[in-house]
Structure formats: structure tokens, C-alpha cells
Image: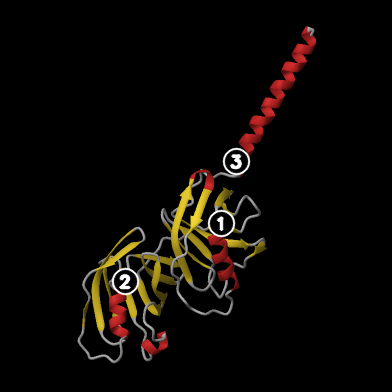
Amino acid sequence: MNVKNIVILFTLIIGLAGCSVFKKNSEIQDTDNSVSIVGKKWQLIEINGKPVANQINGKVPFLKLEEKNYSASGGCNGIGGELTRSKNGGIRFAQGMSTMMACPDMSIEHALSKALLAADSYSVKNDILSLNKAKMAPLAKFKLMQENKQDLSGTWELDYISGPRIAFDGLYPNRKPTLVFDTSAGKINGNSSCNNYNATFKTKGNTISFGPIMSTKMACDGNGEATFFSTLAKVNTYSMSENTLTFIMGDIATMRFQRK
């Protein structure tokens, strides 16, 4: 082989190697799993290849991921459970408890729940999170939400509570419990649907705890007040979405309030 042919062959080898490196680098940039997905909130924008409206039943459908758990909503109920991540973009969602409200449009919630349980991997590109199964077309896509600082201050009214077999309106037929946060003083007050009450509270990140509850001593009909106080004492985390505040015990959504 003459010198000219050797030079040509060497040039081709270098060119092919360069293409290979470029391709690998492009693949890394296209699917950037080095981006942290936890501690962030993601808005659902596509499910099973179909676009999702900005609001479902007047609420933004979302997915929020923490180190070991997740919370989500398809525009109706709060859902959540345990989250497991592994190397190379592996992910698993375990089903937990959810609220049990009925809403006009439940289709997105049902599709989102199925997608979460089916997903086994994820990818991130340009602030778009895709949940996938077996490297097939994405089950669901989300865009990163720029969250405003969560401000608990103000008055909140209860519209859901878990546990009792009595319907919510039967538990609170005349007056819904309220909760008022004074964040500067670390105190809460409100009405249990019967008696006025107050207590202290502490937060760290999304964890929350309440001190002993002090209340007036009026006699109350039914179990509404007792249920409210006992459930409030058990919550340990919270999440906020627009004007909705959800209290959680473990991975169970136990109370939901609307800002007044």
C-alpha cells in the first residue's frame, strides 16, 4: 500500500471516529438524565400522545417528585405514593391512597394514574420530562413549572377529609372548618365547625407539624369537630397547587382546603 492510500485510509478512520463521538454526545444532550427531577413540579402537557389542556376541572394537572415519594393530580383528586429511581433513568411509581372526589372530567386523572404505574424510565430534554415504558413512545409528558413561593398565610376552608364513613356534607352540614395561618408568629387559629381553636405550627420544606390544640368548650353535635382535630394532629407534610392546600399523612392525602 503506497503512502497516498495510507493517508486516505487514516483520514477515513479519524472521520468515522469523529462521527461516532458526535453521535454519542448528541444522544447525551438529547436525553439529559443528569437533570434533577426531584423537588420540582411538572405540569402535564401530553398523555398517550394527546395534548392536555392547561386546566382540567379548573385545576392545573401536575406531577411533583420528591426523593422517595410523589404527588400528582389529573385535575380532580390528589394522588400519590412511593417513588423509586435507579441508574440510567429508571423510575417506578407505587400506588398510594388518593382523595375520592367525583369531578365532571375524570379521563385525564384515570389516564395519568395508569401512565404512572406503567412507566419504567424517564428522560428530560429542554425542561420537558417524559415518562416512558420499554423505550416506546412516551406515556406522558410534563413541562417544568416555575412555582411561586408557597405562602400559607391567610384563611383556608376545608372541603375534603379522609377517614369518616359519613359524607363530607353530612359531617359538616352547617359550617365547614376553617384554618388561618399566621406565619410570622408560627400560629394557627380557626373554627372547627363548632368551637374556635388555636395552636402553634412548624414547617421545614414541605413537612409540617402542629402543637397541642386549644379550643373553646361548646357542646357540638356529631363527630365533625373530633374528626377535624384528630386528623389535623396526624398530618406531617403538605402540598399547594394554586389556591388548594392538601395535608398528607405518609402518602395519604387526608385533608384538603381552599383559600378564602
Secondary structure beneath dot 2 equals: strand
Query: Would you say residue 4 is visible in this rendering?
Result: yes
Q: Is residue 122 above or below residue 184?
A: above
Q: CA distance from mark 1 to mark 2?
A: 38 Å
Residue shown at the point (50%, 55%) measured from the top left: 92
Amino acid, disc 1: Ala
Query: Would you say residue 172 is visible in this rendering?
Result: no
How far from the left and from the top, in percent, is residue 69? 42, 58
Residue 41 horizontal side relative to residue 184, left or right = right
Q: Nearer the viewer, residue 252 or 56?
A: 252
Amino acid, disc 3: Gln
Q: CA distance from mark 3 to mark 2?
A: 45 Å
Secondary structure beneath dot 1 equals: loop
Mark 3 and 1 residues: CB-CB less than 8 Å, in contact?
Answer: no
Q: Residues within 10 Å of mark 3 (few under 14, many from 20)?
A: some
Q: Which mark is residue 246?
A: none
Secondary structure beneath dot 3 equals: helix
Provide the residue designation for mark 2. Answer: 181
Q: Nearer the viewer, mark 3 or mark 2?
A: 3
Toward the top, the furthest residue is: 2
Q: Nearer the viewer, residue 154 or 137?
A: 137
How far from the left and from the top, in percent, is residue 251? 40, 65
Provide the residue designation for mark 3. Answer: 29
Amino acid, disc 2: Phe
Q: Is residue 138 above or below residue 107?
A: above
How far from the left and from the top, in percent, is residue 181? 31, 71
Q: Which mark is residue 119?
A: 1
Q: Nearer the viewer, residue 50 or 54?
A: 50
Upstream in sequence: badge 3 or badge 2: 3
Q: CA distance from mark 3 to mark 1?
A: 22 Å
